[in-house]
Amino acid sequence: MKYYIHTYGCQMNVHDSEKIAGILEELNYSSCDDVKDADVVVFNTCCIRETSEKKIYGHIGQLKKLKKAKKDMIIVVCGCMSQQDGVPAKIRESFPYVDIILGTSNLGELKSAILDAKHKRKYTNTNFCIYQEEEFNQLRTSYPNAWVNINYGCNNFCTYCIVPYVRGRERSREMSAIVKEVEQLVSDGYKEITLLGQNVNSYGKDLQNGENFAQLLHQLGKIPGKFRLRFMTSHPKDLSEEVIDAVAMYPNICNNIHLPVQSGSTEILRRMNRRYTREKYIDCINMIKSKLPDVGITTDIMIGFPGETEQDFLDTLDLVERAKYSSAFCFVYSRRKGTPADTMPDQIPDDVKKDRITRLIATQNKVTREISKQMTGKVYEILVEGTNPKYDGVVCGRTESGRLVNFKGDETLIGKFVNVKIEKSASATLWGSITTEEK
Ligand code: SAH
Ligand code: SF4
Ligand code: F3S
């Protein structure tokens, strides 16, 4: 018996899919790479932008034929899209062959729902519930990296964003449980631990025991052994100096901060409900750079928010040049039903959005090229992540700051730290060669 999981969206979903895979393995299913071979098909969905949703509906539609040919196939739709108001009903109506619909917090019900589906009983539940990570025997799929949830949900309600509606209110895991999980992963041989939260900086607020993200980093930084610790995402409104001091203090914690700016215009930021100004954001970047030499700062930027003027957009471009991000995820604003921005006046026409996204990407590419040039000729420690599927005999890995580097090597290097001299750069990717291998 085989299962096939298609994961859409962000790292939260990638990690949730590892929990789903764990459940299916316990039911004696094994994974396969082709949906046609699967007895259970899982779509772990995302609804952050309209494009993601459209794609997923298309993919669910394509399953109709397969299910007709293979009547016992079990189809599961879970994740953020199925958590949205009205979506389960829409799926039931338009795609009656879907067996199981689960919300973002209902993974614990998957096992019994699959057993039900074997008896042709359909199951839907998207009511929020609280689960403990420890309930799941995760099947980790991203060695040498391991994902670790530290908090779930979001209380920020940025006016464009669907996440607070589909992931629920902020909830932090107990610090002792996180420390235990990370210690176990390090002793199991994982070399990179990535802490996950929509806003890691608000870790602990809901625990009301005075614990916070900086304290968590101190606990994790003290864990012995050679490994890297990363975290995402940091919200600029509450990234504290204490957090950056902790990053600076422990060699295991990477000098790499993902700090989404969204816009360089204070007026747009106000209407996005981001709760910082352009000036405060720049101060934050300067604080980070003064405390962390060689830091890689990455970001998310959105263009085309309702009412964005050419001047607002130029302010964003100017900020991109000043911040010198090592990379940036650039998005076109997408209207999401039920969010305040959806009903704001002055929605931006598509042709203007297209023009702005092109100019934004060109500006960031120029910045990335400048940084790549400065890195050329220098030696960096790289954690080898895998082989490069495009080139034979080439592996890739990241610098501490998060830049991807390609160099000659084979799969025996995966999970090892090597020193690599950067020789040339092609757009965002760097090329180099190993100088000394880890003993
Ligand atoms: N919690 C993270 C972001 C999660 S969503 C944070 O606050 O930074 C990832 C990114 O998707 C966001 O940073 C934003 O840039 C983008 N995004 C969110 N909603 C969007 C929308 N309606 N249209 C376009 N991009 C969006
Ligand atoms: Fe969305 Fe804002 Fe929460 Fe990030 S902080 S998930 S952008 S509401
Ligand atoms: Fe992530 Fe998409 Fe959900 S970005 S939190 S999977 S809406």
Image (cartoon, rainbow, N blue to C red):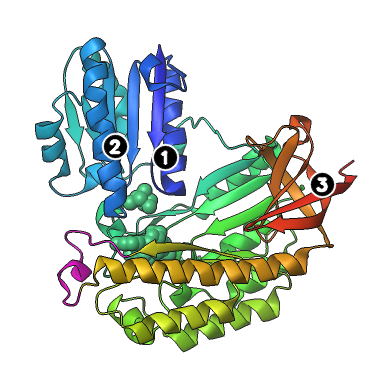
- Tell me the tag on residue 418: 3
Q: Which residues are magenta?
A: 333-346
Distance from the alpha carbon under mark 3 to that under mark 2: 39 Å
Amino acid, disc 1: Asp
Q: Position of residue 114 (x, y in %)?
A: 28, 20
Check whether the beta carbons of the residues at disc 3 and disc 1 lie within 8 A of each other: no
In the rendered structure, which amino acid carries the disc numbered 3? Val
Query: In the figure, is residue 136 to the left or right of 62?
Result: right
Going from N to C along the chain, the mark reached first, 2 or 1, is 1
Mark closer to the chain start, 3 or 1: 1
**Circles 2, 1 touching at the beta carbon (< 8 Å):** yes
Looking at the rendered structure, the kind of residue marked 2 is Cys
Q: Are marks 3 and 2 in contact (CB under 8 Å)?
A: no
Compared to 94, does 367 lie above or below?
below
Residue on which the image places disc 2: 78
Q: Is residue 338 magenta?
A: yes
Residue at point 30%, 55% (across, down): 49
Gap between marks 3 and 1 measured at Cα: 31 Å
Identify the element where label 1 is drawn. Answer: helix
State the mark number for residue 16. 1
Q: Of tags 3 and 1, which is closer to the observer?
A: 3
Kindly indicate the quadrant of the structure image that contains residue 215.
bottom right
